[in-house]
Image (cartoon, rainbow, N blue to C red):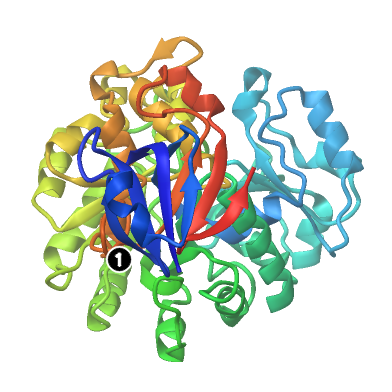
Amino acid sequence: MADLYFNGKIYTMTGENEVVEAVLVEDTTVKAVGTFEELKGLANQHIDLQGQTMMPALTDVHQHLIMIGKKLALLALDDVTDIDEMKQQVADFDSNHKWNNILGYDENNFDNQYKIHIEELDQLTEKPTLITRICSHAGVVNSKAFEALGITRDTKNPEGGYFEKDENGELTGWVYDKAFEEMRAATVDDTVESISEDITRAVKYMHSLGIVGAHTEDLAYYGDFNVPLDAYLQTLGEKELKFRANLLTHEQVYEDVVKANKAYKKNYVERDAMKIFADGAFGAKTALVSEPYVNSDDQGLQIHTREKLEEMVQTARKNKDAIAVHMIGDRAIEMVLDTIEKYPVAKGKHDRLIHVSLLRPDLIERMANLPVICDIQPTFLTSDMPWVEDYIGSSRAKYLYPFKTLLDKGLVLGGSSDAPIEKVNPFLGIHALITREKDGVVYNPNEIVDRYDAFRMYTTEAAKIVYREDIQGQIKPGFLADFIVLDRDVMTIEPDELLDVQVLQTIIDGEVVFEL
């Protein structure tokens, strides 16, 4: 059975503005590209694109897929800007679980960066409740949550995290990084079946946005690692729900996952690099920076000692694996580069630098000389820039998210959302890359990326990151038949129109998995 797509603007992503008249698909791959006249006799079925735009389907190279599925079913506060409305939504919410899990709290949405206090939360709900901050590196809980876990003002902070206290030594309800992770882990009551529902919900939503693959990190947050891993293996595949998931393996479960030696599904569910956390986030002022935050002696949070970081990297190397490291602040980036240089990745592989938010010229030069790629989140810049300069000062802010500089240095950049931290819609990320604009303000305009390079980050470059550049990310013979059909020509429309793009069809392996 062969299908011929024709009568549309078909961007192949084999070069800038490269288009073809028709694409012949046989089984799961592209058989040929060319003119309609050349190919029409080879097809059993002709599919008229009716003048619409077709291009390779998109991949999000860093997200938390299961959490996306949960967020679609839970209360999320990231779009709430009124304090009273936020409190009312929290008071009205009641899950069918032992804990209430609420996502997306962002103090930057409220006047004077309002942070709710434990006493206020106690008035809103008597059920153990965890409200996760938008960055997923911090959260706030009520007294019932602390009681459920036996945490008091005398409880010691875990290494790499802390329980915030006021000037009297009383708990404020806010917990950060490793302390937050421990609180979140306590809320888990998932099963393979419930996680499978979360995966299905998230994947179907991403299909509607033109996303056919994701590099996701979520094996350490839902009880035993087998629960999410088995859910992926049961839910996705050639004969199951079609989606291409690369599973980054959290440092805490890495050795167990490697030892389990599960049977993965090539091109559908594959194990990826060891995921390591080097620091926190700007919003919580836990990103590790080389100079203190403005009006402070604080330089952020170092999750691991240098010795522990080196030990984890050596463990990955023993298994011939790359590492993928969360690093926001320049000091965290420096520590990770030191370690990568000391313990290099196996030949033919590359390490992932995730976020790389605050850089310096010397760090960029070092990165350019290493076998590394960057998982970037373009909408971080439009979320952070309106307020982060107040935290780090204007001189350092010019080195935030220097995407054009990184490209010019020859680094591979993959586009992503870190969803549900940010919205998963890839066209928001592409808009941020080519405008760097928020509410009429353009941030570091010299770092604007051209449109073709922006789309490459979600297609050809995303494929390189997982060593699939020979079969994915372009429309050419021998490549996977993964396409999207769009309601407008995304390569020529005005930048702001990207915010309104609608996906008409998403196709994986030549099969329509979404249709508007």
Q: Residue at x 26, y 28 (%)?
A: 399
Q: Position of residue 465 (x, y in %)?
A: 28, 58
Which quadrant of the figure contains the N terminus? bottom left
Image height check: is 285 above or below 313?
above
Q: Is residue 472 left or right of residue 44?
A: left
Q: Amino acid at mark 1?
A: Ile
Q: Position of residue 106 (x, y in %)?
A: 63, 33
Q: Mark 1 — residue?
A: 323
Q: Is residue 191 visible?
A: no
Image height check: is 447 above or below 336?
above
- Residue neighbourhood size for the residue with mark 1, other residues' Cα within 10 Å, grouped as few (<14), some (14–19), many (≥20): many
Q: Residue at x 57, y 51 (%)?
A: 207
Q: Position of residue 497 (x, y in %)?
A: 49, 21
Q: 418 or 39: nearer the eye? A: 39
Q: Position of residue 315 (x, y in %)?
A: 29, 79
Which quadrant of the figure contains the C terminus? top right
Q: Is residue 435 left or right of residue 234?
A: left
Q: Is residue 285 visible?
A: yes
Q: Residue at x 53, y 56 (%)?
A: 64
SS for dot 1: strand
